[in-house]
Image (cartoon, helix red, strand yellow):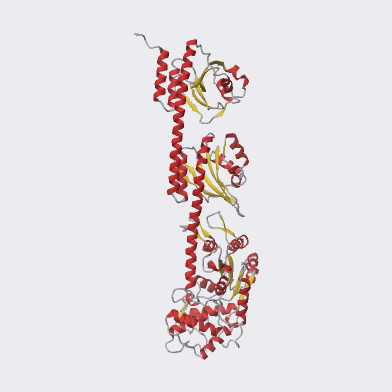
């Protein structure tokens, strides 16, 4: 029996490998190992061409620097490069088996680095074998060696036979690779479609998109940014994820501090971001040199490639998806096509998310407005809120009618208890903004550190205790009216932020750098004399002038005694109903005493006196205690006395004969009377704050300012 021919045995082995192996790397390794048994070479390569013979793709295995048994170095390129301008164009022009001396062949291509590298490694000779499939040239098998090969005619014939087998093998493996790639893309698209249909929250949705896309396209960063038009034009980071090692994607904080020059990529490169593209290698390095943001990721994260996929271009906004990678060859034209095929779905999801988040914000706003409306409904007051016929009140009504139909800022001034909030409500009800909420905030009732959050809102985690995002009063009042009561109590740093809202109609929530717009009409009120506060440096002059566009001053009740009778009748009717007490008549002498009293607490004090009288009265008449004889209104308990340093005010004499006290003296007397009435208690159900209808913290601040100690001595 004849021994098997080595050449035939090699061909049989190659045929078996082609029939059983589908992975191109494994097949390439088997082919090279078999060929080295017959042909001595130091490097083997397979150049694969596209159908048009325009681009090439190289698979390479090197044995340079070690024995045949040593572990070889493999390299394969997923990127096609042009045939034109390379030595391969000569092979394509005349495709036949060649024995090439590298030095002579490379003379026409002195700058072709792959050949120069081979020569530096001692490779001087090359044999090229054309690969044909169905008569069509598909590539070349390349055997390179340090020594000139001594090949016979039979060897060359064998190489041509091997070339035919290799051509079939390469064609099969690339076909299988393309099928696997397309299957992977379909699987990825199905996973992304399922995520888009089933996940409604922003972060988990785009994390799923990034993870599915990462199975097909190699990248280290996934980001979607949206450019909104407006005064503070900037790209909002809508979703950003970074790959940890080769594993999972983690979400990046969207409100992290911006890098200096951030606008370089997101604004200065707006034209670049308007078209699909891949920027890698030297091209990406040139962009990194020019733009600080790209230079930052180039230096700190090793980014070497960028893929841009615009999602939409609209007059009011621009959205773009960007992928980044450390591998300069990470992205191909096929990757770009895959990403672009997903753009319509991502655009639809973005629109749905915007709509969903807007609905959630509107739901929260409606709920807040509902709370305010319920509060408004439950407040006992007449339809217009203004009670009386005095000339001073008629002038206020005229001023309201003049300014209500405009968006002008109104500053309402007057002593405490004169009804500044009632005027603000009347302004809102007479304005075109009546259909939206009147949002009220007392600037003196909150600690300084919480006022900013109340006015502008905060994001989750903005400070300790901020467990969820909160909409601020300016955001809530968008389209409506915001009433800033006690605006003179605002800290100076917040005065500057309020001035910005008044001038620019924009602000940011605490913990966010996103600029929000507001169309809220501003009404402000204070019992301070802001001109004096400005001179004392406690109030900004520019804010004062911005607030004092249209001033409305409320006269104290002592200057309009003719309004006391209608006020008494109104409060007797509403308070009797609220307290479930029968209506009682008021004696003429008592009414005269009420009209003669100076009322340092103004209408609020009158209401509380009437409420007390309704509660304690038993017969057919209202009982005011000793008020008719000595109109102190608040009788001192017999067992209570102030400390020696705090002498009680004397009973008020007839207001027309007594010397006129200053507002500070009136306020001090009024607070002292309330403290006597409550035996020194400030807060709680029996405290002076409830009696005076102000916040306990505000009362304590006023007492400190007026030098009042709340300690009392029981007699």
Residue ID at (54%, 58%): 509
Answer whether residue 629 is visible to the viewer in this image.
no
Q: Residue lying farthest top?
A: 1
Q: Quadrant of the C terminus?
A: bottom left
**Vertical placement of residue 343 versus 84, above or below:** below
| Residue at point 46%, 35% (across, down) | 182
Indicate whether 542 appears above or below 708.
above
Q: Quadrant of residue 286?
A: top right
Please provide percent x and percent y for residue 582: 43, 85
Question: In percent of the image, x 47 and y 50: which residue is there?
Answer: 202
659 or 334: which is nearer to us? 334
Q: How many marks?
A: 0
In the image, residue 386 sits, relative to residue 138, either above or below, namely below
In x, y percent, where is residue 442?
A: 53, 69
Front residue of 499/643: it is: 499
Q: Mark yes or no: residue 203 visible.
A: yes
Q: Position of residue 82 (x, y in %)?
A: 57, 28
Residue 414 lies, in percent from the top left, at 59, 75
Residue farthest left in this picture? 1
> Which quadrant is the N terminus positioned in?
top left
447 to the left or right of 14: right
Q: Is residue 6 left or right of residue 78?
A: left
């Amino acid at each position: 029996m004849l021994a098997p021919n080595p050449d035939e045995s090699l061909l049989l082995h190659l045929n078996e490998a082609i029939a059983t192996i589908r992975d191109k790397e494994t097949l390439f390794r088997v082919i090279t190992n078999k060929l080295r048994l017959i042909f001595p070479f130091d490097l083997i390569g397979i150049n694969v061409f596209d159908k048009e013979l325009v681009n090439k793709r190289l698979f390479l295995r090197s044995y340079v620097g070690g024995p045949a048994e040593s572990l070889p170095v493999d390299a394969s390129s997923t990127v096609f490069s042009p045939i034109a301008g390379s030595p391969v164009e000569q092979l394509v022009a005349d495709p036949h088996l060649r024995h090439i001396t590298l030095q002579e062949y490379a003379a026409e291509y002195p700058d072709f680095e792959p050949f120069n590298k081979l020569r530096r490694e001692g490779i001087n000779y090359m044999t090229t074998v054309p690969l044909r499939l169905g008569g069509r040239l598909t590539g070349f098998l390349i055997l390179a060696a340090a020594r000139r090969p001594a090949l016979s005619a039979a060897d060359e014939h064998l190489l041509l036979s091997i070339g035919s087998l290799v051509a079939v093998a390469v064609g099969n493996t690339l076909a299988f690779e393309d099928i696997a790639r397309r299957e992977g893309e379909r699987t990825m698209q199905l996973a992304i479609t399922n995520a888009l249909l089933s996940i409604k929250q922003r972060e988990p949705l785009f994390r799923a998109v990034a993870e599915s896309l990462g199975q097909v396209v190699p990248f280290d960063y996934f980001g979607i940014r949206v450019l909104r038009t407006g005064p503070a034009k900037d790209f909002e980071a809508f979703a950003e994820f970074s790959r940890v090692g080769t594993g999972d994607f983690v979400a990046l904080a969207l409100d992290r501090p911006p890098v200096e020059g951030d606008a370089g990529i997101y604004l200065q490169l707006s034209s670049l971001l308007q078209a699909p593209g891949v920027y890698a290698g030297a091209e990406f390095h040139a962009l990194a040199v020019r733009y600080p943001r790209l230079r930052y990721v180039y230096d700190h994260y090793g980014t070497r490639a960028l893929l841009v996929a615009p999602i939409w271009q609209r007059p009011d906004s621009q959205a773009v998806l960007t992928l980044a990678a450390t591998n300069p060859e990470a992205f191909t034209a096929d990757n770009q096509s895959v990403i672009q095929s997903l753009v319509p779905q991502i655009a639809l999801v973005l629109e749905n998310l915007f709509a969903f988040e807007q609905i959630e914000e509107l739901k929260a706003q409606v709920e807040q407005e509902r709370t305010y409306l319920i509060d408004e409904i439950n407040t006992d007051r007449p339809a217009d809120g203004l009670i009386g016929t005095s000339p001073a009140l008629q002038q206020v009504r005229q001023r309201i009618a003049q300014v209500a139909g405009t968006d002008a800022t109104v500053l309402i001034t007057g002593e405490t208890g004169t009804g500044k909030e009632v005027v603000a409500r009347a302004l809102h009800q007479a304005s075109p903004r009546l259909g939206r909420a009147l949002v009220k905030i007392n600037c003196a009732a909150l600690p300084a550190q919480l006022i900013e959050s109340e006015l502008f809102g905060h994001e989750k985690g903005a400070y300790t205790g901020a467990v969820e995002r909160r909409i601020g009063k300016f955001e809530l009042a968008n389209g409506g009216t915001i009433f800033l009561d006690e605006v003179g109590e605002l800290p100076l740093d917040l005065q500057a932020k309020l001035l910005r809202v008044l001038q620019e109609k924009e602000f940011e929530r605490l913990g966010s750098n996103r600029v929000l717009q507001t169309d809220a009409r501003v009404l402000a009120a204070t019992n301070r004399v802001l001109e004096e506060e400005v001179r004392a440096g406690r109030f900004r002059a520019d804010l004062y002038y911005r607030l004092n566009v249209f001033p409305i001053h409320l006269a104290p009740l002592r200057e309009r005694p003719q309004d006391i009778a209608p006020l008494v009748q109104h409060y007797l009717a509403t308070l009797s109903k609220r307290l479930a007490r029968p209506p009682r008549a008021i004696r003429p002498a008592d009414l005269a005493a009420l009209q003669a009293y100076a009322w340092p607490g103004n209408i609020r004090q009158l209401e509380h006196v009437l409420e007390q009288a309704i509660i304690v009265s038993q017969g057919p008449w209202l009982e005011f205690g000793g008020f008719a004889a000595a109109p102190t209104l608040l009788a001192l308990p017999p067992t209570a006395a102030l400390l020696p340093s705090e002498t009680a005010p004397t009973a008020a004499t007839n207001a027309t004969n007594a010397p006129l006290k200053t507002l500070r003296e009136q306020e001090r007397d009024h607070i002292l009377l309330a403290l006597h009435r409550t035996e020194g208690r400030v807060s709680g159900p029996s405290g002076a704050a409830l009696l005076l209808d102000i916040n306990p913290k505000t009362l304590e601040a006023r007492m400190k300012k007026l030098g009042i100690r709340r300690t009392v001595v029981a007699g």
